[in-house]
Image (cartoon, rainbow, N blue to C red):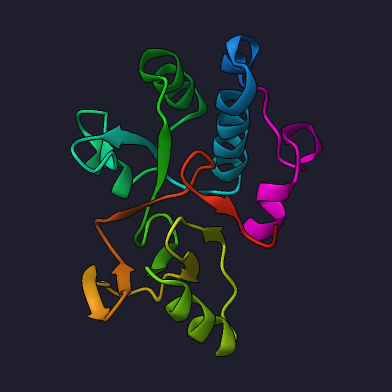
Amino acid sequence: MNPNDTLKRRHSEHPHYRAAPAYSNLQGSDRQVYETVCLLHNDGCHLIPTGGGDDSKTPIIPRWKEYQHRQPTSVELNQWQQKYHPALWANVCGAASGRIVVDADSRECQRKLEANGLKPHVLTPKGAHFYIEHPGYHVKPIVRVVPDIDIRGDGSYANVTHNQAREAND
């Protein structure tokens, strides 16, 4: 999966597109966000709705941790969209989803990671997220592994959608 390509394709152009009934009642940026969610889901991401809490990044579903072990169904995504109208969605990181995220919290750190051959998958207001294939052993989430770099490993999540993030390679 190349998330850069995924985020740029319209839903109907995606080779694994599955119709999502919730599209019919969505407009503008809500529709764009949900289309992105469906594309990422079709590419194997374990997505959950977020946008709660003081930081507006907290999951808004009651039992999100089960999605560390299984991908939500298309029906669940549709139900969450219709019930919660989430402002953000997050990718659950870990072995089941097959990826971890290196979260660069500054443009300087983003540039250093890019200079070392990594390409950002999601540009955030402060920096970027870099998706890394899960190595097959437990990866502990670490905040500030070095200044302005967090590791979103097993049991964590990273926001991915457009209301908060800028698309990589704009």
Nearer the observer, 59 or 136: 59
Q: Which residue is pictured at 39% across the width and 66% down the height?
A: 100
Q: Is residue 17 above or below residue 128?
A: above
In the rendered image, residue 94 lying in the magenta stretch gets the answer: no
Whether residue 1 is visible here, answered yes or no, is no
Q: Nearer the viewer, residue 18 or 57?
A: 57
Q: Say which quadrant the C terminus sits in.
A: bottom right
In the rendered image, which quarter contains the N terminus?
Answer: bottom right
Question: Percent from the top left, x then y, of residue 135?
Answer: 40, 76
> Which segment did they paint magenta?
3-19
Name the foreground residue: 146 vs 136.
146
82 left or right, relative to 4:
left
Question: Which residue is painted at 20% across and 28% down in the image?
Answer: 62
Give the x, y percent position of residue 45. 49, 48
Q: Is residue 49 above or below residue 110?
A: above
Q: Position of residue 59 (x, y in %)?
A: 27, 37
In the visual, does 136 lie left or right of 3? left
